[in-house]
Each structure stands twice: as C-alpha cells, then as structure tokens.
Amino acid sequence: MPSPFQRHIDACNNIGSPAGLIPFRIGRAQVGWLGPDLARALTFFPREVHFDAEGVALAARLRTPAARSEALAGLAQALAARGHLRIRGEAFDVRATPGGPVVATLDRGAVPAFGVIAEGVHVNGLVHWADGLHVWVGHRAAHKAVAPGKLDHLVAGGIPAGHTVEQTLVKEAGEEASIPPALALGARPSGTRLSYVMRTEEGLRRDVLHAFDLDLPDDFVPVPHDDEVERFELWPARRLLEAVRDTDDVKFNVNLVLIDLFLRERLIDPDGAEGRALRAGLDQGPG
C-alpha cells in the first residue's frame, strides 16, 4: 500500500514526460520548455526568437546575458499584455542546470511559462524541548496568489537574480519572520537536494529547493514583517507530521521539505520500505 505521504510527492511531479512541450534554448543550451500556446504567441516576435527543428531559441544575435535579459523582459511584458503570464516585478536567474552559469534573467512571473529552472530557500525553524522536537509553522496570508491560507515554513522564498542561497536566506528571514542576520546565519543545510517538475496553470515549475534547519532559542518568537504570513505557531513535530500525512493543509512544496525533515529526524523510518521510497521520490526534478 502506498505511503500516505507519497501523494504530495506525486502532486509535485505530475508530468510523466515532456511530450507536447517544446524545448526553449538560449545559445546552445536548453533552458526551458514551452507549451504550445506560448510557442504560438512567440511566432509574432521574429526578431527575438527563432524556430527550428529543435524547438525555439532566443535570437543568436543576443550574445550577452544583459542583451538576452533585455529581450526576455520585453517578451514577458508583451506576453503579459496578451494574458499569457503575470509580471511579478522580480528577476530570477536563468540557467540550463541548477548551479550552472547564468545566461540571462527573466521575470519571476514568466519563469513557469518558459519552463525555466527556479531555485528557492526553505528553512525549518526548530525548537528542541524535553518532550521532543517542535517546529515553527507559518499561516500564509489569505490574499496570496499561490496557496492562500495554507501552512508554510518559518522562512521560504525564491532566489532572486544575482543572489546566493545564503544571501536569500538572510533576506527572507528578516523580511518574513524578523529573524536577525546573525541568528539566520546559524541555519544548517539539510544535506539533501529536493526538486520536482510540476505542470500548473502558469506553465511548468522546475524547482530546486535548498532546505535548511535553524535551531531557535526557547524564548525567540518570530514576528511577520511583511504580508506573506499572517502569524506563526509552534507545533510539536508529531502534530505537523499528522497534518502532512492526513490533510492537504500544507503548501504543496513545503510538504516535500517536511517529509525530508521527518525522514532525517526518524519520525518516518528512513530505513524501511516507506522511507526509502519517499527518499527516492524527493529528487525527481531538473538537472
């Protein structure tokens, strides 16, 4: 019988193959996947994109990251005006592989439409009490475009263009939970890589998640500093495990980071058949 946690991994990996999608290239490197509707829309921009037997490519005359970024920004604005995507006003780096060289930047709202890899930071806020592990849980604001009202991490956010993982961690920790930089820098990498490929209404999410554990003092209480989260609550890890196992109350990709935490903390036996299957499912994504 499949693990009840498996449905969250399956939901984030809901595309079995890229059949029907069209490769998108910058230079010689494939950086994304386009749906048919977006590809058709791009035929109206022959100066910026070229079509060939291998798919769609940004014009070869655009040789520098700056020139490519400018062209992509113009395309994103034009496509947004036609209803194909929503501009977010924040640039993300474009890479062919996670951690590879940056070949351009692209507005965050256009990243799934172009099927480009996105990377993000997720932080488990942990408190160790005598009765066991506790985890800080955020309640997402009801107005959020993605997963409104769902349960979330203490800190999570996409990595903006030009930022490192560590810079993003410190920035998001301060913005979302009023965590001082010195405290945020104590976060430990989980040591596991999490990724998934998910078809959504916006396009194809090809996400890589950098998970961290942050041990917090007993007397530290995170305070929302922006409009991302309405409030934080400290939950016993077992209660959070039951929420992931039995409900769909947790934001879709946060489930994956929490399953990883439960495996590492042995709340789910990592050596049993269930644990091994879950571990194998947590890295199905790009690269």
Image (tube, rainbow, N blue to C red):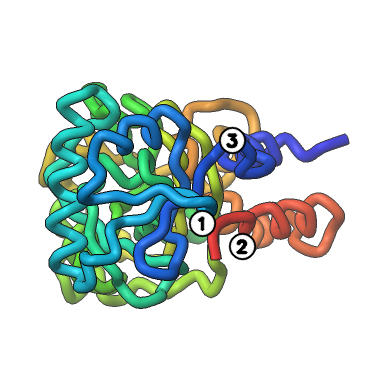
Q: Secondary structure at mark 3?
A: loop
CA separation in Å, label 1 and label 2: 9 Å
User: Taking 66 as reference, is 56 above or below it?
Assistant: above
Residue denoted by label 3: 20
Which residue lies at the image location 33% right of the left edge and 25% below the top edge? Answer: 149
User: Taking 184 as reference, is 222 above or below it?
Assistant: above
Instruction: Answer whether labels 3 and 1 touch (C-beta < 8 Å).
Output: no
**Residue 32: x, y in percent?**
44, 53
Residue 124 can be seen in this image:
no
Callout 2 amino acid: Glu
Left or right: 190, with 142 as reference point: right
Which residue lies at the image location 37% right of the left edge and 33% below the top edge? Answer: 38
Residue denoted by label 2: 265
Callout 1 amino acid: Leu
Viewer-nearest of labels 1 and 2? 2
- Marked residue nearer the N-terminal end (2 or 3): 3
**Residue 121: x, y in percent?**
35, 60
CA separation in Å, label 2 and label 3: 40 Å
Residue denoted by label 1: 133
